Amino acid sequence: MGEKMTRQGVPFERLKIASFDFTCCEGCQLQLTNRESSLPDFLGLLDVRNFREISSERHDDYDIALIEGSISRQDEVERLLKIRKQAKILVAFGTCACFGGVNSLKNRHPVEELIDEVYPGMIIETLPVRKISDLVKVDLSIPGCPVDKGEIERIMVNLVTGSLVTLPKYPVCIECKAQLTTCMFELGEICLGPLTRAGCNAICTSGNTPCLGCRGPAEEINMTAFFELVKERGLSLDDLHEKLAFYNAFEPFSSHEA
Ligand code: SF4
Ligand code: SF4
Ligand code: SF4
């Protein structure tokens, strides 16, 4: 895909990669430059063709495009379509790109009302928020708010070696229990860990904060049983609906009623 290199005598081609930000906080792109202990090895896998946060060079001959953020303006739609034409592999990178993310909270209100409230008297162009797959074909989704650098490193090695790219199918509870963390339900809190795809090493619950589901649904979740659990514990269904809506990651289940 890119420049030929060898590592320990084994030839490999660096990934010709570009990273683009849309409506987001850029926290996911920032993760790419984290973990200094492994950063030289990680960057050694990549031929960075376009990545505003780390290089002033701009090249259009990339194979892999990381798309960070959701889409909330018309110029973003046009930029995304152009990137899709160039990229062989288009990656929805982070929760905003995969699901809409926190930006989607805007969709709960008429856009005109929000502009009047936040930017009174100003002309602001803003559209309802859409995730990347609402507009173009997505080849690979890497969720997380932000993405997990360890997971990104593993996926990049998979791509360099042509291996199957997989995400954990099991829920956050598995990673949480492996750390012997006291369950947030025992502390009277609603935690979305049983519904949410693992891969973050249960970073929130191990810090005594309930999971809000930023990585989206795990495989084969049982939403009915989860609603029953919340009811049995005497916890608020309104709070549950609020949590499920926070990242827009459980939108396919939004019609679920207890
Ligand atoms: S997913 Fe979270 S960290 Fe990543 S860009 Fe969106 S808001 Fe920022
Ligand atoms: S705290 Fe959350 S993630 Fe951990 S076991 Fe309880 S429900 Fe699962
Ligand atoms: S614990 Fe839940 S909210 Fe926290 S990073 Fe993991 S998936 Fe996201």
Image: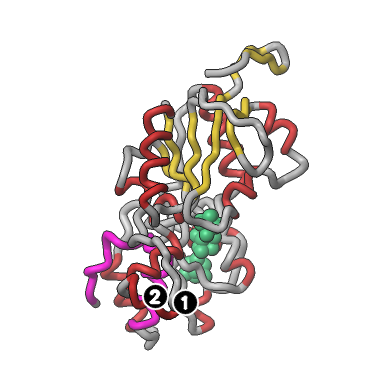
Q: Is residue 145 visible?
A: no
Quarter of the figure with residue 114: bottom left
Q: Secondary structure at mark 2?
A: helix
Q: Amino acid at mark 2?
A: Leu
Residue 72's x, y, as percent? 39, 56
Please state which of residues 219 and 149 is positioned toward the viewer in this rendering.
149
Check the image and tell me how it is coloured: secondary structure
Q: Quadrant of the C terminus?
A: bottom left
Residue 240's x, y, as percent? 37, 77
Q: Amino acid at mark 1?
A: Val
Res 114 label: 2
Please state which of residues 122 and 57 is positioned toward the viewer in this rendering.
122
Res 118 label: 1
Residue 54's x, y, as percent? 68, 40
Please state which of residues 182 and 84 is positioned toward the viewer in this rendering.
84
Q: Secondary structure at mark 1?
A: helix
Q: Residue furthest right?
A: 37
